Image: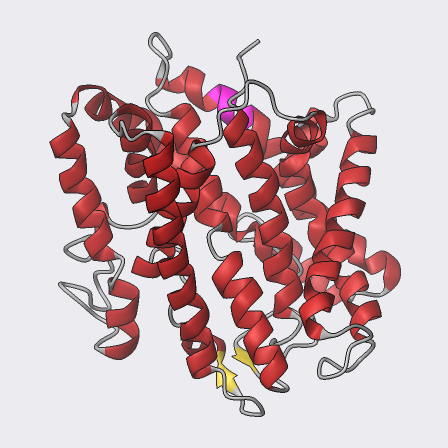
C-alpha cells in the first residue's frame, strides 16, 4: 500500500469543501430557477455582492486547480515500467464507472421528486455521449481531468529529462497564456490565428490545465524552498490572487442589474493570472504541512472526496432552498452565515451518504472509494 502524502489529503478535504462553498454562493447571484449561476446573473443587494465575492471568488476559486495540481503531483511522471495502456486502464477504471453512474443519476433521479420533466430527461440522455446533463453542471470538471490523464503518459518522458530551467520556460509561457481570457473579453474574441475555421491559436498547446500539470511537477521535483519560505511566499501569493479575484466580481456586480454571467465572472476562469497566483500560493502553504499522519477524519474524507464531489448537488439544492426560503435578499440566516452553512450541511450529508455507500459491495464503481 502506498504511503499517503498528508498535505495532499488536507488539500482534497479543503478543496472538496470549497467546491460546495462555490455552489452555495451561486444561489445568491444566479438569475436562474435552478439557483446556480446560468447565463445571466443578478445580485439582490450590497451584502450579497460582498459575500459572494468573498466566499466564491476570494476563498474558493482555487478549488478546481488545486484538484488538478494534486492529481499531477501524484501521477507525474508515470512510474517506471508503466505502459500507456496500463496507466489508462488503472486511472480510467477508477474514475469512469462512478462518473458514468452519476451522469445517469443526474439524468433520471430528479424525476423522482419532480425536479425535471421526462422531455428534459430524455434530451439529456441523448446528449450524454457528448456532454454532462443539464442538472449536473459541476461534472464539467471530469472532461478536462480525463484529458489530463490522456496526456500524462505523453508528457512524462519530457518531464523526466527536462532541466528545471526548461520547465520554467514552459511554466512562463503558460503563465502568459492566462491573460488570454481577458483579451478574449476586452480586446477580441479571436487572437493569434483564431478564426471560425481555426480554434487552435498560437499559444494553444502551452495553455490550459497542462500548465498546472507542469507546475505541479516543478514544485515536487525542483522547488527546494524550506517550509518557512513556502508558507511566507504562499500566503502572499494567495492573498494577492484571491483579493484580485474577489474584487473583479465586486467591481462588475452592481446590485439590481441583470448582467451576463461571463462578464460578471470575467476574472474567475481557472486559467487566469489571479487564480494561478492564488492556487500556487495555496499549494505552497499546504505543502509546508509536515505531519507524519493526518487525523483519521482527514484521511477518511480524502478517500471519500470524489464521491462527495459527484453527489453534492443532490443535497446542496434542497438545503439552499430551505435556508433561502424564496428570498435571496433576506434568507433565514444572514448571508455571511447562510453561504457557509449551506456548504457545511451539504458536506455533512455527502460525507455520511458516501461513507454508507462504501459499505456496499463494489462501491468503488459507484463512488470511487
- Res 223 → quadrant: top left
Residue 212 appears in the rendering: yes
Residue 304 or residue 55, whichever sits in front? 55
> Residue 174 at what x, y percent from top left?
23, 48
Does residue 256 sit above or below 190 in this rendering?
below
Q: How many marks?
A: 0
Residue at left 73%, top 67%? Answer: 338
Percent across and percent down for residue 18 are: 58, 52
The answer to whether residue 143 is left or right of residue 225 is right
As drawn, which residue projects farthest toward the front?
A: 228
On the rendered structure, is 155 left or right of 98?
left
Would you say 271 lies left or right of 67 here? left
Main SS of the magenta segment? helix
Q: Which residues are magenta?
A: 89-93
View extreme (right): residue: 113
Up the image or down, 292 lies above or below 119; here it is: above
The image quadrant where one finds the C terminus is: top right
Q: Residue at x 74, y 60 (%)?
A: 342
**Residue 192 falls inside the magenta stretch:** no
Q: Name which quarter of the figure residue 318 lies in.
A: bottom right
Residue at 75% x, 22% y is 362
In the picture as drawn, the residue positioned furthest to the bottom comes out as 256
Q: Is residue 206 found left or right of 134 in the rendered image? A: left
| Nearer the observer, 83 or 286 | 286
Residue drawn at x 78%, y 32% is 355
How is colour applied across the structure in the image?
Answer: secondary structure
Camera sees residue 147: no
Q: Tell me residue 276's x, y (percent).
A: 34, 52
Residue 180: x %, y % from top left: 25, 63
In the rendered image, which quarter contains the N terminus? top right
Amino acid at each position: 500500500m502506498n504511503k499517503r502524502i498528508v498535505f495532499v489529503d488536507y488539500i482534497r478535504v479543503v478543496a472538496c469543501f470549497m467546491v460546495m462553498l462555490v455552489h452555495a454562493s451561486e444561489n445568491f447571484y444566479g438569475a436562474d430557477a435552478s439557483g446556480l449561476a446560468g447565463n445571466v446573473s443578478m445580485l439582490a443587494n450590497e451584502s450579497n455582492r460582498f459575500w459572494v465575492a468573498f466566499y466564491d471568488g476570494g476563498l474558493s476559486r482555487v478549488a478546481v486547480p488545486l484538484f488538478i495540481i494534486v492529481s499531477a503531483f501524484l501521477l507525474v511522471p508515470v512510474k517506471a515500467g508503466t505502459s500507456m495502456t496500463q496507466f489508462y486502464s488503472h486511472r480510467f477504471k477508477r474514475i469512469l464507472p462512478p462518473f458514468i453512474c452519476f451522469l445517469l443519476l443526474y439524468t433520471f433521479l430528479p424525476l423522482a421528486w419532480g425536479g425535471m420533466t421526462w422531455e428534459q430527461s430524455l434530451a439529456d440522455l441523448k446528449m450524454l455521449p457528448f456532454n454532462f446533463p443539464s442538472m449536473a453542471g459541476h461534472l464539467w470538471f471530469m472532461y478536462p481531468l480525463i484529458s489530463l490523464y490522456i496526456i500524462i503518459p505523453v508528457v512524462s518522458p519530457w518531464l523526466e529529462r527536462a532541466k528545471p530551467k526548461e520547465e520554467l520556460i514552459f511554466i512562463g509561457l503558460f503563465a502568459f497564456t492566462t491573460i488570454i481570457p481577458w483579451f478574449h473579453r476586452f480586446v477580441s474574441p479571436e487572437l493569434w490565428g483564431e478564426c471560425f475555421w481555426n480554434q487552435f491559436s498560437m499559444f494553444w498547446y502551452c495553455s490550459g490545465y497542462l500548465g498546472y500539470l507542469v507546475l505541479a511537477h516543478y514544485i515536487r521535483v525542483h522547488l527546494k524552498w524550506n517550509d518557512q519560505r513556502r508558507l511566507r511566499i504562499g500566503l502572499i501569493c494567495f492573498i494577492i490572487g484571491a483579493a484580485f479575484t474577489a474584487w473583479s466580481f465586486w467591481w462588475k456586480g452592481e446590485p439590481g442589474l441583470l448582467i451576463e454571467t461571463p462578464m460578471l465572472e470575467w476574472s474567475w476562469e481557472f486559467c487566469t493570472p489571479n487564480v494561478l497566483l492564488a492556487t500556487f500560493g495555496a499549494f505552497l502553504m499546504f505543502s509546508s504541512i509536515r505531519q507524519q499522519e493526518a487525523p483519521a477524519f482527514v484521511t477518511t474524507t480524502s478517500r471519500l472526496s470524489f464521491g462527495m464531489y459527484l453527489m453534492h448537488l443532490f443535497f446542496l439544492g434542497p438545503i439552499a432552498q430551505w435556508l433561502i426560503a424564496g428570498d435571496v435578499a433576506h434568507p433565514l440566516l444572514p448571508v455571511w452565515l447562510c453561504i457557509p452553512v449551506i456548504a457545511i450541511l451539504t458536506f455533512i450529508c455527502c460525507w455520511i451518504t458516501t461513507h454508507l455507500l462504501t459499505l456496499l459491495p463494489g462501491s468503488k464503481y459507484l463512488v470511487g472509494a
